[in-house]
Image (cartoon, rainbow, N blue to C red):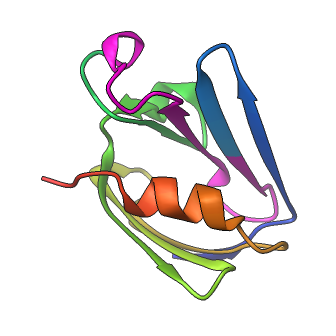
Amino acid sequence: MKVSSLAESITAENGFTQIAFDLSDSEPGYLLIALPNDPLATTEFFGHDHYVEVKDQIFGRYGGLAALKIIREVLLEISLSYEIAGVGNALTVVAREAIPASIRSRLLGLPRG
């Protein structure tokens, strides 16, 4: 499902970085990806290197990204390791602003299994 982000927010506090996309004009509603600031500090992430949430907190999962690709600075292709009713397991997000290089690097550095 291809969606456009109305706004993006990046915050870094309490030991993790959170990237949020406002998708309120579409079925997914929003996309949230959280990463520990120290990639080796995964204790709060239940042993995973990220947390992803789409549409509602009940659809949030630690280690929920199956694949992630960034095309240009504003296009994010995501495959989830699970299905969400009305959304599926694949999202292509067109960001309103360029995703900063440091965040792109962190996202692309997430190991996928």
Q: Can you tell which quarter of the image residue 6 is in?
A: bottom right
Give the residue at x 28% y 29%.
Answer: 48
Q: Is residue 25 above or below residue 34?
A: below
Q: Is residue 86 visible?
A: no
Q: Can you tell which quarter of the image residue 16 is in?
A: top right
Q: Is residue 70 above or below residue 53?
A: below
In percent of width and height, residue 59 lies at 46, 34
Q: Which residues lie in the magenta part?
A: 20-45
The outermost residue toward the left is 113
Q: Is residue 109 magenta?
A: no
In this view, the residue in front, 45 or 64, is 45
Give the residue at x 66% y 13%.
Answer: 14
Exactly how many numbered labels are in the figure?
0
In percent of width and height, residue 45 lies at 37, 19
In this view, the residue in front, 6 or 45, is 45
The outermost residue toward the bottom is 72
In percent of width and height, residue 12 lies at 72, 31
Give the residue at x 78% y 67%.
Answer: 5
In percent of width and height, residue 73 lies at 66, 81
